[in-house]
Image (tube, grey):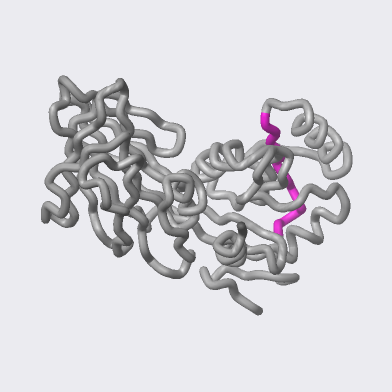
Amino acid sequence: MSLSATGLPVGPQRRFGHGRIAFEAAPTPVATDARNRLVSLYGNCTLAQADVIVPLGGDGFMLETIHRALEVNKPVYGMNRGSVGFLMNTFDESDLLARLGRAQAAELHPLRMHAVTVTGSVEEALAFNEVSLLRQIRQAAKIRITIDGRVRLAELSCDGVLISTPAGSTAYNLSAHGPIVPLSANLLPLTPISSFRPRRWRGALLPSTVEVLFEVLETDKRPTAAVADFTEVRDVASVAVSLDRNVAVTVLFDPDQGLSERIIVEQFTV
């Protein structure tokens, strides 16, 4: 039996029980139409009953599905019926069970966000792409950055700052001019968003074992929100972020189109 880099079986050895698939569609006509056609060919079941979940849409919908897949511990094989589709496979109605059998696995671990608001309330959320802090009003945010208990940046004046997973390094992180990180690198990009002071600070690459603490300065004057994927917490006072290796979801990709390969290709895309 051949194994992926995560230790999961790949190629023809992969089995999905009785071929039970849960098709999920983004709320768009093209995704809904694709779901209807696939259901007519392969049937459908609930997420809890499925051997594999197949979302149809774009990367945003894929991300939502990954979060739902955590609750039922099922692998996810996305097919692109959206725009970019970086996390998705090419849409094809034919031979889906065979494609699933040949799929390569990538095991993704999320960032865990622990946010404390100015009123003292605490909220936690998981992020497979990134955790970002963003200014809420016209005033720039001011943020202190502490890593493993040591202050590394006493004051960052900016529109925001984010920390991303390797899988998420090609998303918002890349748009903010952060580095793309291979899955095997065990690094987390820390990237400023429109940094004003220090103007030339471009961010950092951190070991995946660190805990990062963001403290918002002048919270009354400079309210700041924290966002973990699609979970937003407004008026935060502090946000602690670390990679949670006790949580994982398996994402499936067609052969030679695995996530590691896509991340490499993205670095040569102009």
Residue 139 location in percent, x, y?
A: 25, 24
Q: Is residue 72 magenta?
A: no
Quadrant where the C terminus is found in the figure: bottom right
On the image, the x and y values in percent for residue 16 come to 70, 57
* Image point (23%, 29%), residue name: 236
Give the image location of residue 237, x and y in percent: 18, 31
Residue 268 seen from this side: yes
Write down the quadrant of residue 124 in the picture: top left
**Which residues are drawn in magenta?**
16-26
Which quadrant would the N terminus be assigned to in this image? Answer: bottom right
Where 9 sits versus 231, above or below? Answer: below
* 263 lies left or right of 187: right
Residue 112 position, x and y percent, is 33, 45
Inspect this view and state whether residue 119 appears.
no
Whether residue 20 appears in magenta in the rendering, the answer is yes
Residue drawn at (22%, 38%) of the image: 157
Q: Is residue 260 above or below residue 221?
A: below
Pick out the residue farthest to the bottom: 1
Q: Is residue 178 left or right of residue 59?
A: left
Q: Tell me which corner region of the image, top left, top right, bottom left or bottom right, holds residue 39.
A: top right
